[in-house]
Image: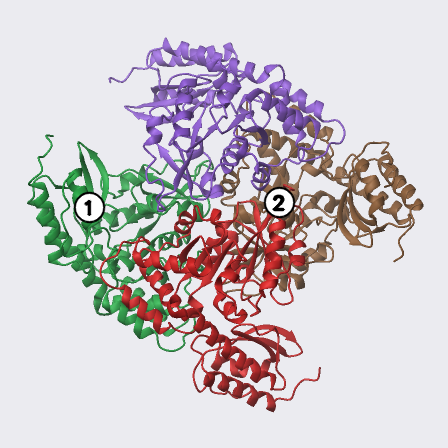
Chain colours: A green, B red, C brown, D purple
Amino acid sequence: MLGQVTNPTGKSFGSDNHAGVHPAVMAALAAANTGDVVAYGDDELSRRAEQMLCAASGAARALLVFNGTAANVTGLSLMLRPFEAVICADTSHLNVDECGAAESILGSKLLTVPTPDGKLTPDLIAGRLVGRGDEHRAQPRVVQLAQLTELGTCYSLPELRAIRDFCRENGLLIYIDGARLANAVAHLGCSLAELAGCADVLSFGGTKNGALGVEAILVMTGSLAGNALFHRKQLMQLSSKMRFLSAQIVGLLEDDVWLKNAEQANAMARRLSNAIAGIPGIDLAYAMEGNGVFAELHRDVAESLQEDWRFHVWSATGNGRCVVRMMTAFDTTEADVDALAGGLRDRLIHVKQPTA
Amino acid sequence: MLGQVTNPTGKSFGSDNHAGVHPAVMAALAAANTGDVVAYGDDELSRRAEQMLCAASGAARALLVFNGTAANVTGLSLMLRPFEAVICADTSHLNVDECGAAESILGSKLLTVPTPDGKLTPDLIAGRLVGRGDEHRAQPRVVQLAQLTELGTCYSLPELRAIRDFCRENGLLIYIDGARLANAVAHLGCSLAELAGCADVLSFGGTKNGALGVEAILVMTGSLAGNALFHRKQLMQLSSKMRFLSAQIVGLLEDDVWLKNAEQANAMARRLSNAIAGIPGIDLAYAMEGNGVFAELHRDVAESLQEDWRFHVWSATGNGRCVVRMMTAFDTTEADVDALAGGLRDRLIHVKQPTA
Amino acid sequence: MLGQVTNPTGKSFGSDNHAGVHPAVMAALAAANTGDVVAYGDDELSRRAEQMLCAASGAARALLVFNGTAANVTGLSLMLRPFEAVICADTSHLNVDECGAAESILGSKLLTVPTPDGKLTPDLIAGRLVGRGDEHRAQPRVVQLAQLTELGTCYSLPELRAIRDFCRENGLLIYIDGARLANAVAHLGCSLAELAGCADVLSFGGTKNGALGVEAILVMTGSLAGNALFHRKQLMQLSSKMRFLSAQIVGLLEDDVWLKNAEQANAMARRLSNAIAGIPGIDLAYAMEGNGVFAELHRDVAESLQEDWRFHVWSATGNGRCVVRMMTAFDTTEADVDALAGGLRDRLIHVKQPTA
Amino acid sequence: MLGQVTNPTGKSFGSDNHAGVHPAVMAALAAANTGDVVAYGDDELSRRAEQMLCAASGAARALLVFNGTAANVTGLSLMLRPFEAVICADTSHLNVDECGAAESILGSKLLTVPTPDGKLTPDLIAGRLVGRGDEHRAQPRVVQLAQLTELGTCYSLPELRAIRDFCRENGLLIYIDGARLANAVAHLGCSLAELAGCADVLSFGGTKNGALGVEAILVMTGSLAGNALFHRKQLMQLSSKMRFLSAQIVGLLEDDVWLKNAEQANAMARRLSNAIAGIPGIDLAYAMEGNGVFAELHRDVAESLQEDWRFHVWSATGNGRCVVRMMTAFDTTEADVDALAGGLRDRLIHVKQPTA
């Protein structure tokens, strides 16, 4: 067992959820706390939040919910009938990390697809389009993407548009899990609307990007929005004091706080990725295309640093090595990154590398 | 049409949800926003919130969720198998105001009971205990009470204990919807533990009592708690930045803010109720036993005041009259009450009463 | 305790389900058992069964399922989205006798209505049309009728058409549970198509009318039929050896066996009803309008005859009296009826009637 | 396009579902059709059927349902809570051919596993036992096997016992889809009880083995049976005229008709398999271990014979070749097999084989 290396700044690389609330969001919450306001979203601030979301994304409707699993389930609920299925990457959060909510609450089958990097392609989707029209088979109806993916990779706009075109030709709808959509926009340098326009419904994550706890569902295809309020309420996502969800959105959207937060997180991931490139015995596991650095290294080293920097051991890769996930957030600093890079370098240059 | 009477203080009597966040809760949120914290509740503040809830109520476990519908559905999910049913008042929030969540998400049948005042009794419950053991019938398993009820009434401890004893003798569990449990504790002058001890599982509402948005599920019967974390996650109620739900609870429980808030709301409802007793043409519709005043008056009068004071028209009662619901909150003041009472008095003494 | 009276013919009046299979149905089953046939309904006999059903009823599609609960759940599944609700009589089979299948499998709320005779009316339906458009409320979408009702009563065609007109004006669909539809047709003297035309979807029961076990779902409103095959399969109602369900339907429809069976059952119920009219101490509880006789009598008398004639004690009515249900079937004979009537008369003239 | 070869005997090799009803079953149905019998299984014949099933298998309870999908869903419903998942082969009928019933009706996640031959192993199961105790993950609880598998292969008793031991050590229950359990018993030469003893719950298929339409659920682990009647009713599988399901079971179990039927089907599959071994250009795709022969051949040949012999093209395998499934049934004869083998031989010796 290697000795513990101390994290001097205390910053966690475990998740962008470990970060707190951005000051602009806290200020917006305080500002919203003045006097009485009608409940359930029938208030000025909530109308403003929805307008800002629609203006920025081109959505027909925007609805706020409490967390990412709820955004996925509620968003998908607008698109699926009981006998219809969702094609998704087998590594997707929807499939792996939501305790079976899609199956249990929506009753929907997930048609999972192995991928090298968390990303679907028209070919991978086509491979699951069997048995259409056959009453014995759940019928594929929605393609679920994540942007960023669960492996930190980012679809390019051409990749997304190719999927969108394929889906339209094949009678499929697209849902994008955008828990880290801001990081994707920042990475691609595109507009939110360009990205959102590739989906029929998508989520726009606030929580991982500096909010206290709010996610928006953006309904791009207006015909899917008609009953959305009923779905949200039934799925236990209607906030009575809605103004405090709305305030978070306003706080993030005003002055492009959301984008600046994502850019900062991405820049810090880039810095970490660059530093790792110069350290022997550690290699990127997936392309670094947002705010997550997935790297492979010796498990002993990973474990000696893990408790202090809190990153996750993502998977074992054999030969005593493993992949770790290191996430940055809106408040990750250069000093935070340099400390972790230093810890990794310090460990790895003292560890005898296994012979391949 | 009568002319509009203006609400001089602007205070809404429409719902305790119209109020904002209590300063102690805002302070607790700000205090929680320091540095990084592990997500999903594995943090000190969250442990403290659960400990405080368990200590105050005698619960075996306490879990935080986002809103009242979620508390009801998640709480009930711990108690029910697919073929089991819930006995509840037909006026209950669970039955009326949750968009069918219990049926859709849990798949549970609600066996509804008409009541004069929103309160179940052993006799009313017994009336639904037919067909037990008959495979054609959904099997009654949980009795769902609300405390306060949806009609503003409050079970006495002897009433609750009689129901508890009846349920134990008859193999029934008790769930209490405690969205306004604090108001019930304040009204009864009992401890939270005395009240909670009458249930197997109950909710303890924060949102209507000064929180931004949090409800606690208190699991009194420990054997029901084993899988509660899975249920909460699958039901889309696991907050990633849990510390900010926990902070609200801590803010409410420290220095008994929750109880003082409820006492203030109740006192203002009492003041309103007393004032109404002296006004002709308006009568209490149900006993005033918390923070809700339900009163019957001429519909024209109700409508002339409704927009400005925002109270709900609850039901029509014939002869041109209706029942309105006027709710007080932790921040309702004497001036607010006196203004509404004045408005009612002013209107009603000028209106020719219908002859009964 | 009164002594036992013996049932000389052995015929049960407990249920039309106690009867066996009509010879024409058995013959049709045997005739279908020749050589190999493609499974799942893609065979000549199945096509013929559907054509016969559609021709007789005017349905756009007809689908066969295994039993009455399945017919109701599958039929309703074609009409409901998750947030929509069903208005039905509180005495309906759907609400009382299907172990919560509608709630558990469809996730649908039932909005139950007390009725004097098991029959809904436009006014009773209107009373449940509250909260439309309010996201907190499950939205009424389907009115579920039973024809015959669970209390043996039969809607007249004008009554049904009034409900149909009301539903069309109010954006409601109609589902008819036709487990005893044949008896209704026989009672009304109308055509199957006249009756079926009052519904958007309905079931046409075979099992209680001489089949071994088959029910048809008739989809009258073609736009609801598009995905019916998927619903049936997912709801576990697709028979692999479908020809043997289809054969039963053909056996019943050829030579109007279904109607003759119903007419015989109805005639025997009429005979029983007439006999009862001449016996002191027993009174019809509901109008006799099909093949069920509901009568009120002293509980001791009921119990002394119940074991031998197997009728059900339906409900207690106070003063030592109860309502019993006596059902006739396609194979009930005059001798069977006369024996029961004799048993009742024999008992009742010897029993001291309670003073009212 | 090759010319059509005519099937001289007309026997379908498309499915064991294409066969009709065995004479012993028809006789049992006729014998059951005498007079009135109490509905829903409370009759002598139904008790006898259950006793025979329990005696033959060692089951604590046996319940009859209508079809194979229902047997799987109902059986699994006894074993699963909402947050629990089922490990199964990705080729399983449960996953592929039941229109998402497990997800939609039970709300259960299926954790699918690729296999070379449709068979799970302890190692394959172990690969899906990740995230146990982690609230974000659906919790593996049931291992679902099929015996025969969907690919016609058969677990040996040692293989099953190794899985059973692994499952017991790992807190997993076993469900066996026994739609073709009789063929497995015949293939292994073991007793039904030896096979059933490897499961906690299993189905025993009647329909594919000469019944008109009935499957039995055998509950081996008595503690899982307590609420089975409620589950069956709610899942729309309670037959009112139950005697006619029971009669089929009695007809199959008396004189070991079920076993003789399976032996005949297996022998014919063996004959077909042996014949194929001598034909160039066609190869077994999976081990022939029951009543299904999966063979790879040139697609043109397959298609030229498919319409007449009705076998399924199961999958494409590249290079112009495909796998076909040829099923035998209780009534397949040597002449039927020889005709098909002749057709294959005739076609294949005239077709130029592709160069590998």
- In the image, residue C20 lies at what x, y percent? 72, 31
Q: Badges 2 and 1: C-beta atoms under 8 Å apart? A: no
Q: Up-down: is D150 above or below B256? A: above
State the quadrant of the N terminus of chain C.
top right
Q: Nearer the viewer, residue B199 or A315?
A: B199
Question: Crowding near pointer 2: few (<14 within 10 Å), some, many (20+)?
Answer: many
Residue at the disc numbered 1? A306
Residue located 63% across and 20% down the image:
D251
Q: Nearer the viewer, residue B306 or D60?
A: D60
Mark 1 falls on what kind of element? helix
Q: Nearer the viewer, residue A50 or B135?
A: B135
Amino acid type shown at disc 1 = Gln
C110 to the left or right of D32: left
State the image quarter where residue B294 is shown: bottom right
Cα separation between marks 2 and 1: 55 Å
Residue at the disc numbered 2? C98
Question: Crowding near pointer 1: few (<14 within 10 Å), some, many (20+)?
Answer: many
State the image quarter where residue D215 is shown: top right
- In the image, residue C287 lies at what x, y percent? 79, 52
- In the image, residue D213 lies at what x, y percent? 58, 28
Chain letter for mark 2: C
The total of numbered circles placed on residues is 2
A137 to the left or right of C75: left
Amino acid type shown at disc 2 = Glu
Residue located 53% across and 37% down the image:
C236
